């Protein structure tokens, strides 16, 4: 690439920053097309059964109500690959909170009142929503999320564990978690003749277009999906969700533009959640801490309509050099909402277990937890045997330890008190795979020396608009302010979603290729450019998705200092520091924000966030932001994020790894390990809320998760 | 915009007050708006649906997230919790009205907090941002007026301005959730402005 000095890696300000701080950035529910009306869903009040009747008379009699859609009268959709999108197609209720009707009215108030007036009769049958690791319906799936094999075994892990000099045999439990982006899932749809135009709060409008075209039996060219500004997603907007399908349906039925914005309390059941994971973890090692055996067995749930298996045992295949290894998943289908992606699916809960177990092993063997990890650093990826394209975990641990002043730590648990507070520190490693998908982009140079890059990338808050402009400017060798990026519209060249920490690599590669071609054409061009400039196109199919002979992952290390209040049981994080090795960092300002944001979500996972599936009702009890506690300002200290320079020629033309998810990975373990160091009590079930912590401190009951329930 | 105020919604169809509708005048960002409002309508929905001021966001509709924070007669409030019918004659400032030169987004000058939020990268997705900024405006005024917070030293003299250190800022902005986790940068942005 041409070198323009500071373009790539520079802390460029967010391009849409002004729009966001002035309130002029419009999100999906804020498309005030003339005649736009609102729709409000009615959700199932049973966990399992069928709808016998939807009584709509009272709702239809209310002022402003235009129609009530249910499975009785809703348009028939083509079969959906994703069963969660087959809304209002059948009377079946697969879980509580499933949409059973939709009220469309002139105003929000009228739509809400209409929804309250709809009466639904059900034929309920018994439900089972309770995950246990000995559930009779548990089975081993073919694959876990992301195509990972469900079961991997090398050597003789059981025998090696039995023979080990030092052993850890333990259980961990991560509850269901909710993404809860600040913008609830929303869509505004209108029909222009036979064309469907939808504004959708989505992480990838190209896929939304494809799915809508299929469901409504349209050519893809007859569907436009716009996701210009998206108020966060964290995986829950990675593929289409019901609102956009409902909005399109209702718009067709009423002939009006329709907005469907999910009420917050409906989200827990309708947009996916991180499935609960029950972990059995066994580590065997020699007396000096060299791992001989690692067994990570995960049990999780899925819904009756969709198999989604949180791949929480997968990080065990990447992290440490144990010659005998087992990593396996089993899944139990229950009458629960369908789980899906939440920031670092697999890695986030999996590394909580891996890194907690490593801390337990360090305590058991009397070793420093940083040194234990260094001791077990593998030469090649343990599961695949592939060489790492780059792996600087040890450097992250060392740099983090230096910055955190780890050397001064007294390793003895419960060695530090400040009045009623116990103080402790902990460490955990982080990892996240490198994922890249093919994309297309065009680059356009105009006679006035300006450039337009077009690609259907999505900015869900990552700074995609900004970093793609940086990549283009760098490749073209022009100042950043000469480049404009058009994105967030499915009429643009198709591109994959903002997910799997793959966006910048996937989109950036296509932008790089289009701009490289344009630069070459400009270099070969003599005289003034034609009036409409020069255009190039790139498609990275075949290159971006080519198999790599390398194991490619980002790594990091998290260090936490906590205080534990022995009176209230409250844990507070006093310091939180992350050091990452994630290839080349392309925008120092927005990258730091992503790392800090991921760590903040990890802090929530550790201390405040937890959802409960109520056995009696089949509902997630903590279904709004008053009950499901995402971290607030006062919970979050001045988090530090650093990175080391990492050169890796085996990634993409920018040399970058994804950074959107690694910040959450391992953070909960670092905090949990710090709580153990502070208290001497090992808590193994998240979140570390005051009730659990106080119970453990007072020794009333052992803080070990029961293997059932 | 004028035509929108009397074109949207069945509640306007009658065009006159009745058992379920009342006329109110809201002074929004310096400009009076006289509307017939549904008694069920909250300020947030009137701003967004009737006045096309979408800066105030709907994150939860239940006063739990703060994304809808606006200023009513100079005090920060959750717009989703206030029935508009109860606000006749009130002065309302939204994020669109903070910038110098009024007229919101058309103003070239940003409010110092808006500028600081951009410089400190105090947001990612931007959805909580208008609420964070309005809340910070209100919080700074409250501290200046001597309102204590949970973390204010109880020995501090009553009624005197409260200095806003990081802990005070975190405490006072804790009604505004940010799922992207921009909190440390928001604290810095606020510090930049009060310094």
Image (cartoon, rainbow, N blue to C red):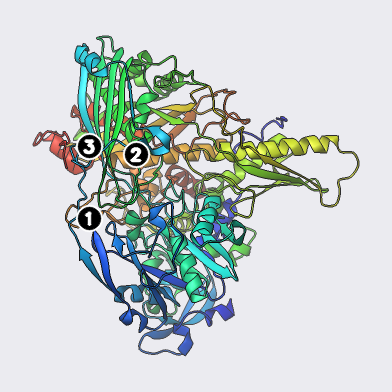
Q: Nearer the viewer, residue B185 or A444?
A: A444
Q: Label 1, label 3: how many angstroms apart (C-alpha)?
A: 21 Å
Q: Secondary structure at mark 2?
A: loop
- What is the quadrant of the C terminus of chain A in the image? top left
Q: If you read the primary sequence from the N terminus, does the residue marked by circle 2 or circle 3 appear first?
A: 2
Q: Are marks 1 and 3 on the same chain?
A: yes
Q: Which quadrant holds residue B66? A: bottom left
Residue under disc 1 on the same chain as residue under disc 2: yes
Closer to the camera, A118 or A589?
Answer: A118
* Image quadrant assignment for residue A400: top left
* Mark toward the viewer: 1 or 3: 1
Query: Is B78 located above or below residue A412 in the figure?
Result: below
From the image, which quarter does the N terminus of chain A lie in? Answer: top right
Q: Mark 1, residues whose alpha carbon is within 10 Å: few (<14), some, or many (≥20)? A: many
Q: Which mark is residue A685?
A: 3
Snapshot quadrant of residue A88:
bottom left
Q: Residue at 8% across / 36% down in the picture?
A: A700
**In the displayed structure, does residue A390 sit left or right of residue A414?**
right
Kindly indicate whether the residue at mark 3 contacts the one at mark 1 (C-beta within 8 angstroms).
no
Report which residue position mark 2 lands on.
A310
Q: Chain of mark 3?
A: A
Q: Chain of mark 1?
A: A
**Farthest residue in the right direction?**
A527
* Residue at image coords 21%, 11%: A165
Q: Is residue B153 left or right of residue B145?
A: left
- Going from N to C along the chain, the mark reached first, 1 or 2, is 2
Left or right: residue A601 compared with residue A531: left
- As rendered, which of A464 and B176 lies closer to the eye? A464
């Amino acid at each position: 690439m041409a070198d323009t000095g500071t373009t790539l890696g520079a802390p460029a300000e967010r391009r849409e920053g002004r729009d966001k701080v002035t309130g002029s950035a419009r999100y999906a529910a804020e498309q005030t097309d003339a005649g736009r009306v609102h729709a409000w869903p009615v959700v199932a009040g049973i966990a399992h059964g069928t709808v016998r009747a939807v009584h709509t008379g009272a709702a239809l009699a209310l002022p402003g109500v235009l129609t009530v859609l249910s499975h009785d009268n809703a348009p028939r959709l083509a079969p959906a690959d994703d069963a969660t999108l087959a809304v209002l197609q059948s009377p079946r209720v697969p879980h509580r909170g499933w949409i059973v009707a939709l009220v469309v009215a002139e105003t929000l108030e009228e739509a809400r009142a209409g929804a309250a007036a709809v009466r639904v009769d059900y034929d309920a049958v018994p439900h089972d929503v309770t995950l246990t690791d000995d559930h009779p319906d548990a089975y081993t799936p073919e694959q876990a999320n992301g195509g990972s094999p469900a079961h991997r075994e090398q050597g003789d892990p059981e025998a090696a564990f039995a023979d080990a000099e030092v052993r850890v045999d333990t259980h961990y439990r991560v509850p269901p978690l909710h993404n809860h982006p600040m913008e609830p899932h929303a869509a505004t749809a209108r029909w222009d003749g036979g064309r469907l135009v939808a504004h959708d709060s989505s992480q990838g409008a190209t896929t939304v277009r494809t799915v809508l075209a299929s469901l409504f039996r349209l050519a893809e060219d007859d569907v436009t999906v716009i996701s210009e500004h998206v108020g966060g997603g964290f995986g829950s907007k990675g593929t289409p969700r019901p609102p956009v399908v409902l909005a399109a349906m209702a718009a067709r039925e009423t002939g009006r533009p329709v907005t469907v914005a999910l009420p917050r309390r409906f989200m827990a059941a309708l947009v996916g959640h991180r499935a609960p994971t029950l972990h059995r973890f066994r580590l065997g090692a020699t007396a000096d801490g060299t791992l001989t055996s690692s067994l990570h067995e995960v049990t999780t749930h899925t819904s009756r309509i969709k198999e989604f298996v949180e791949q929480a045992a997968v990080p065990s295949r990447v992290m440490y050099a144990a010659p005998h290894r087992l990593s396996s998943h089993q899944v139990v289908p229950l009458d629960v909402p369908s789980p899906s992606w939440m920031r670092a699916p697999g890695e986030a809960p999996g590394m909580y277990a891996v890194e907690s177990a490593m801390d337990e092993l360090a305590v058991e063997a009397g070793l420093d937890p940083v040194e234990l990890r260094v001791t077990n650093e593998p030469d090649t990826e343990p599961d695949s045997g592939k060489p790492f394209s780059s792996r600087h975990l040890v450097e992250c641990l060392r740099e983090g330890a230096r910055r955190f002043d780890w050397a001064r730590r007294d390793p003895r648990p419960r060695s530090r008190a400040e009045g009623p507070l116990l103080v402790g520190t902990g460490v955990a490693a982080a990892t996240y795979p490198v994922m890249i998908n093919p994309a297309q982009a065009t680059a356009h140079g105009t006679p006035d020396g300006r450039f337009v890059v077009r690609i259907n990338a999505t900015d869900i808050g990552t700074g995609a608009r900004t970093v793609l402009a940086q990549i283009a400017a760098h490749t073209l060798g022009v100042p950043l302010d000469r480049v404009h990026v058009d994105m967030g519209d499915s009429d643009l060249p198709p591109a994959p979603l903002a997910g799997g920490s793959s966006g910048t690599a996937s989109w950036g590669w296509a932008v790089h290729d289009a701009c490289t071609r344009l630069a070459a054409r400009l270099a070969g061009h003599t005289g003034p450019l034609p009036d409409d400039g020069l255009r190039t196109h790139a498609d990275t199919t075949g290159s971006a998705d080519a198999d790599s002979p390398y194991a490619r992952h980002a790594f990091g290390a998290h260090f936490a200092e906590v205080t534990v209040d022995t009176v209230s049981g409250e844990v507070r994080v006093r310091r939180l520091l992350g050091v990452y090795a994630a290839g080349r960092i392309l925008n120092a300002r927005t990258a730091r924000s992503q790392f800090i944001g991921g760590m903040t979500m990890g802090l929530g996972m550790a201390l405040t966030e937890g959802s409960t599936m109520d056995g009696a009702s089949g509902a997630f009890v903590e279904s709004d932001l008053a009950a499901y506690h995402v971290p607030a300002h006062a919970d979050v200290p001045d988090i530090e994020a650093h990175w080391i320079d990492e050169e890796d020629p085996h990634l993409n033309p920018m040399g970058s790894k994804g950074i959107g998810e690694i910040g959450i990975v391992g953070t909960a373990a670092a905090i949990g390990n710090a709580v153990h160091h502070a208290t001497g009590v090992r808590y193994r079930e998240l979140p570390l809320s005051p009730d659990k912590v106080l119970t453990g401190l007072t020794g009333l009951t052992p803080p070990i998760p029961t293997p059932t329930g | 915009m004028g035509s929108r105020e009397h074109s949207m919604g069945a509640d306007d169809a009658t065009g006159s007050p009745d058992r379920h509708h009342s006329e109110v005048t809201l002074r929004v960002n310096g400009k009076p708006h006289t509307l017939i409002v549904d008694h069920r309508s909250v300020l947030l929905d009137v701003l967004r649906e009737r006045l096309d001021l979408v800066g105030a966001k709907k994150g939860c509709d239940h006063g739990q997230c703060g994304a809808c924070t606006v200023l009513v007669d100079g005090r920060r409030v959750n717009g989703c919790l206030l029935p508009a019918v109860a606000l006749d004659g009130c002065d309302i400032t939204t994020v669109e009205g903070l910038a110098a030169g009024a007229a919101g987004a058309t103003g070239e000058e940003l409010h110092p907090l808006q500028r600081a939020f951009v410089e400190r990268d105090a947001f990612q997705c931007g959805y909580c941002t208008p609420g964070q900024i309005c809340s910070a405006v209100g919080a700074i005024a409250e501290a200046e007026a001597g309102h204590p917070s949970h973390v204010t030293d109880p020995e501090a003299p009553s009624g005197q301005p409260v200095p806003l250190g990081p802990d005070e800022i975190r405490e006072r902005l804790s009604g505004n959730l940010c799922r992207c986790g921009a909190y440390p940068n928001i604290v810095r942005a606020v510090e930049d402005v009060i310094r």
